[in-house]
Image: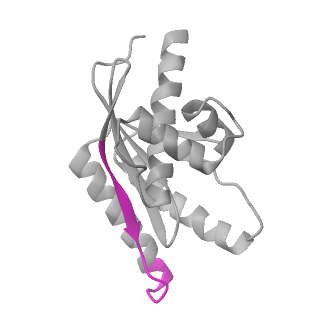
């Protein structure tokens, strides 16, 4: 199966306070930067309204950019389980928005994203950010970090989907 000539992929780095997004277009082997940013919510907003704001923000991005695919990092539990639960809820509303839009979602481990973007599974954050900058031909590393991570997830979706389509 040959990849279509033009793909638009949304990458998402979910979080309750800040959900990063990155939009990348791909045509054959060329990546093109489209947009990036964050959907922010504040701690003084009721929890359910924060989740609803993330859902509406992602839904608006889907309507605006009309992505055909999505990429997102899998959830991993570090030291703070309570913050991981909030991230899991944010991931849930993002996943729901994507499902309602009929957009296939690829989920990738942190090591998988580093491998796909940098070529080294144990790359550090600055290496990933610099690789994103270079791959997308940007003058500067995209900010904030959540948006740069989302662009990396979009690039990973493109790279891994290309590999899978070549194998079939």
Q: Position of residue 23 (x, y in %)?
A: 34, 44
Where is 35 relative to 88, above or below? above
Q: Position of residue 30 (x, y in %)?
A: 34, 23
Image colouring: one colour
Residue 119 appears in the figure: yes
Instruction: Give the residue at the far right of this rendering.
Output: 79
Seen at 54% across and 34% down, the residue is: 117
Residue 153 appears in the figure: no
Q: Which of 54 and 23 is in front in this view?
A: 23
Q: Position of residue 79 (x, y in %)?
A: 77, 67
Instruction: Give the residue at the far left of this rendering.
Output: 64
Seen at 73% across and 70% down, the residue is: 81
Q: How many marks?
A: 0
Q: Position of residue 159 (x, y in %)?
A: 49, 26
Q: Is residue 44 magenta?
A: yes
The part of the chain drawn in magenta is: 34-48
For the N terminus, the quadrant is top left
Where is 49 relative to 6, above or below? below
Instruction: Give the residue at the far front of this rendering.
Output: 139
Relative to 96, 81 lies left or right: right
Q: Is residue 167 magenta?
A: no
Where is 104 relative to 89, above or below? above
Relative to 78, 126 lies left or right: left
Seen at 66% across and 66% down, the residue is: 84
Q: Which of 15 and 111 is in front in this view?
A: 111
Seen at 36% across and 58% down, the residue is: 37
Relative to 56, 51 lies left or right: right
Q: Which of 64 and 150 is in front in this view?
A: 150
């Amino acid at each position: 199966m040959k990849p279509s000539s033009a793909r638009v992929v949304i990458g998402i780095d979910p979080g309750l306070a800040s959900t990063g997004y990155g939009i990348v277009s791909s045509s054959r082997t060329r990546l093109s930067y489209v947009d990036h940013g964050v959907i922010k919510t504040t701690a003084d907003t009721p929890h359910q309204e924060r989740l609803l704001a993330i859902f509406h923000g992602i839904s608006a991005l889907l309507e605006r950019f009309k992505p055909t695919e999505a990429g997102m990092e899998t959830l991993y539990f570090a030291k703070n389980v309570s913050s991981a639960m909030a991230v899991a809820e944010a991931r849930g509303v993002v996943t729901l928005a994507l499902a309602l839009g009929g957009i296939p979602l690829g989920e990738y481990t942190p090591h998988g994203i580093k491998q796909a973007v940098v070529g080294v599974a144990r790359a550090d954050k600055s290496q990933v950010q610099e690789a994103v900058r270079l791959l997308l031909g940007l003058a500067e590393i995209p900010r904030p970090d959540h948006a740069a991570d989302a662009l990396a997830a979009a690039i990973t979706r493109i790279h891994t989907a290309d590999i899978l389509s070549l194998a079939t």
